[in-house]
């Protein structure tokens, strides 16, 4: 059976020679219909870049290698013609930057309707009506009025949901959401995630959900990919990630999840240090400098992503396999 | 938007009043004197006094200004002491020439500059980009009189395609008129095109990098729509501003080109008037140019506010 999306050995590099920055390294990823795959990691680890690469919307200076297959069809072709035909209709994306991702010169209703008219070939009036329905669906109050608003008249959270409405407009088969809830309060965040869940169940949409907050993905995602400085450090079904996190980085991320019981949000400084600049990666394990259980041999060679149990991959010389339950 | 435009209109009016003062004082304080110029170097003292009296040149400057404004408000631009004709009849002859020259040059500038700017931005770093930049640089760095003379040498003297000088009114013989206009319009229009091209390219490059252009691509829109609709709409505003400025620059700067091609426009009228210290004519021309500048600036603001919903909706009911 072919996957909805199958990514193999994806690399994104900026520059060349000694100054080359390998911002995404050797990423493998697969998404099935109706599945939610979470891409998790700290700021700058290459999540957005990965998503943009899949849409082929990377800056011109980025060099992309690897294989991206959509329903078995290679879409990482030379000219990018294949992905162009899929964008907006089969594969849709919600960008991380809600404030600047909408065109300031057109009403949000028009911007949603534009997509509908293009892909569903609906006449103007019907498209406008459907745009209002979509705004209602992403839980925007008074959608008839909001449709006539320009982006600058809406809050960041509203704009993010407008972006969501655009992405949903043509019932995509694969939806890429880049931190779709960052600008939202807890209630709206829950509503948006509810829509995503609905979509997966009812429309059988495959979803790539990017976040830096492992807490968000617990109830929603099927698979989790943990990225660190461009590399995948751990990849597993969501239950394994939560019950048996094996990479020290993953355990650090889990420890940083705000406990719903204390109500106090802890920062990610549970893991000492910061993500290294991708250019200055240490030799050996890229996480060695920040790792709490680093050993001498960690600095020798780069650990490969290896299967430590069924469907559970980890790139660590000393993965912890003992059971540790993280209470949420 | 109404509020905004009213405010802009008010500001324009104040600017106009200030401009009229500057024009008046500027002209009247030119070295030399109209009365002297008129009576000639060796004119008698009596003649000089008579002229001074006739044109009120002996009154204080403030009174002269008030008289002049009063006259303007009644619709009189005065009489040229040199020719004895009313300034308005003189302007009626000259303005169409300059206006035609300016409008055609701007149109040529738009037709060449804007597509070239878009093309250069879209094909950044490619042959088209380099070519347009090189041509633009040439257009900007070559003095217009030299370019004009070159055209005359080539197309009039050598190939006899266009007349080197002379002018036939648009209304009496449109074909001949356009033939007269081709070379001067190319001279002035190429400069406008160069400026517009660079502005358009810079604006377009910036917009093409923006997140909403990326969104437009993510929607699956064709590159034509992405550029022609989403990017153009937002990068054209700066071009409109420059266009307005260019109009003013042309109106006041056509003198050299008119001189090169011997076109009887405002530029030549001004030059003659300066030599003869023809105050009424000079004042009328300067005020006319200043007024068009101000009106065009206001129009630019109007266009700007129509293009930009942030201004359009500010203060209004949205
Ligand atoms: N044009 C570029 N030139 C060079 N490096 C770049 C460029 N664009 C991105 N990068 C590098 O790619 C890396 C990944 O950036 P990306 O935006 O994907 O991070 P992210 O995981 O989405 O972070 P965040 O959580 O802050 O959104 C960054 O470290 C950045 O330095
Ligand atoms: Mg990001």
Image: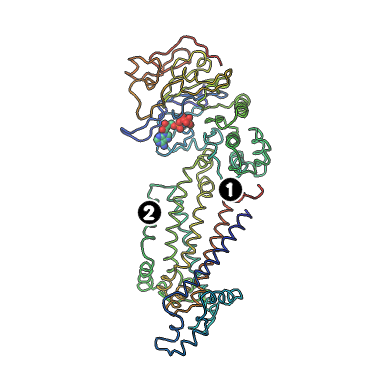
Parent chain of label 1: B
Count residues near mark 2 (Cα–Cα under 10 Å), then give few for <14, some for 14-19, many for 20+. Answer: few
Q: Is the C-beta of the residue carrying label 2 under 8 Å from the nearest atom of ligand 1?
A: no
Residue in the image at 43% along x and 54% along y: B198
Q: Position of residue A216 (x, y in %)?
A: 55, 23
Residue A188, disc: none
Res B187 → quadrant: bottom left
Q: Which residue is mark 2?
A: B131
Residue in the image at 42% along x and 50% along y: B120
Q: Which residue is mark 1?
A: B310
Label 2, secondary structure: give it.
Answer: helix
Q: Is residue B205 above or below residue A238?
A: below
Q: Is the C-beta of the residue carrying label 1 under 8 Å from the nearest atom of ligand 2?
A: no
First along the sequence among labels 2 and 1: 2
Q: Position of residue A157 (x, y in %)?
A: 59, 34
Q: Position of residue B205 (x, y in %)?
A: 45, 47
Mark 2 → mark 1, Cα distance in angstroms: 36 Å
Judge whether residue A50 can be spotted in this image. Answer: no
Count residues near mark 1 (Cα–Cα under 10 Å), then give few for <14, some for 14-19, many for 20+. Answer: some
Assign the C terminus of chain A to one quadrant of the image.
Answer: top right
Q: Is residue A309 above or below residue B37?
A: above
Res A289 → quadrant: top left
Q: Is residue A69 above or below residue A285?
A: below
Front residue of this view, candidates B155 and B257: B257
Judge whether residue A235 can be spotted in this image. Answer: yes
Q: Specify the farthest residue to the front.
A: B60
Parent chain of label 2: B
Front residue of this view, candidates B296 and A176: B296
Front residue of this view, candidates B156 and B186: B186
Label 1, secondary structure: give it.
Answer: helix
Q: Position of residue B249 (x, y in %)?
A: 46, 64
């Amino acid at each position: 059976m072919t996957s909805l999306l199958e990514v193999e050995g994806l690399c994104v590099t900026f520059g060349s020679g000694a100054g080359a920055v390998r911002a995404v390294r050797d990423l493998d990823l697969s998404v099935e219909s109706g599945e939610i795959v979470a891409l998790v990691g700290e700021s700058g680890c290459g999540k957005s870049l990965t998503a943009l690469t899949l849409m082929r919307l990377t800056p011109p200076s980025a060099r992309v290698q690897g294989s991206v297959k959509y329903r078995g069809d290679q879409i990482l072709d030379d000219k990018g013609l294949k992905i162009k035909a899929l964008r907006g209709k089969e594969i849709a994306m919600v960008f991380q930057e809600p404030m600047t991702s909408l065109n300031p010169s057109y009403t949000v209703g028009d911007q949603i309707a534009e997509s509908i008219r293009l892909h569903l070939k609906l006449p103007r009036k019907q498209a406008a009506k459907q745009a209002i329905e979509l705004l209602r669906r992403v839980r925007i109050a008074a959608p008839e009025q909001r449709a006539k608003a320009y982006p600058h008249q809406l809050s960041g959270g509203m704009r993010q949901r407008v972006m969501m409405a655009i992405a949903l407009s043509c019932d995509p088969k694969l939806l890429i959401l880049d931190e779709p809830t960052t600008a939202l309060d807890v209630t709206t965040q829950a509503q948006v995630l509810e829509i995503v869940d609905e979509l997966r169940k009812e429309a059988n949409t495959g979803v790539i959900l990017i976040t830096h907050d492992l807490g968000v993905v617990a109830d929603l995602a099927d698979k989790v990919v943990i990225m660190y400085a461009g590399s995948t450090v751990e990849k597993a079904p969501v239950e394994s990630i939560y019950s048996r996190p094996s990479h020290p980085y993953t355990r650090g991320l889990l420890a940083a999840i705000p406990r719903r019981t204390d109500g106090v949000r802890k920062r990610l400084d549970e893991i000492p240090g910061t993500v290294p600049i991708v250019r200055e990666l240490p030799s050996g394990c890229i996480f060695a400098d920040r790792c709490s259980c680093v050993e001498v041999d960690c600095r020798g060679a780069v650990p490969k992503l290896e299967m430590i149990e069924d469907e559970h991959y980890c790139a660590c010389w000393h993965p912890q396999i003992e059971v540790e339950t993280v209470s949420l | 938007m109404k509020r905004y435009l009213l405010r802009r209109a008010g500001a324009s009016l104040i600017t106009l009043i200030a401009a009229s003062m500057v024009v008046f004082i500027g002209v009247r304080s030119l070295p030399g004197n109209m009365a002297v110029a008129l009576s000639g170097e060796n004119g008698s003292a009596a003649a000089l006094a008579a002229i001074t009296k006739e044109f009120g040149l002996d009154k204080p400057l403030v009174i002269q200004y008030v008289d002049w404004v009063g006259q303007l408000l009644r619709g009189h631009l005065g009489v040229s002491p040199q020719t004895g004709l009313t300034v308005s009849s003189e302007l009626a002859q000259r303005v169409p020439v300059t206006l035609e020259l300016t409008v055609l040059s701007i149109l040529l500038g738009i037709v060449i500059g804007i597509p070239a700017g878009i093309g250069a931005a879209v094909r950044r770093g490619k042959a088209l980009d380099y070519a347009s930049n090189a041509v633009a640089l040439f257009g900007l760095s070559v003095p217009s009189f030299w370019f004009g003379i070159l055209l005359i040498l080539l197309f009039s003297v050598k190939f006899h395609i266009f007349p080197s000088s002379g002018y036939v009114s648009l209304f009496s013989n449109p074909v001949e008129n356009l033939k007269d206009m081709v070379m001067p319009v190319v001279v002035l229009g190429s400069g406008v095109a160069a400026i517009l091209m660079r502005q358009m390219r810079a604006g377009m490059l910036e917009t093409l990098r923006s997140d909403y252009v990326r969104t437009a691509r993510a929607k699956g829109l064709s590159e034509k729509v992405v550029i022609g609709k989403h990017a153009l709409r937002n990068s054209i505003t700066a071009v409109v501003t420059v266009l307005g400025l260019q109009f003013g620059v042309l109106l006041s700067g056509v003198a050299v080109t008119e001189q090169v091609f011997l076109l009887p426009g405002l530029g030549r009228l001004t030059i003659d008037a300066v030599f003869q210290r023809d105050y009424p004519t000079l004042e009328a021309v300067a005020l006319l140019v200043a007024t068009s500048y101000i009106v065009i600036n206001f129009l630019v603001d109007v266009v700007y506010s129509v293009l930009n919903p942030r201004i359009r909706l500010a203060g209004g009911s949205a």
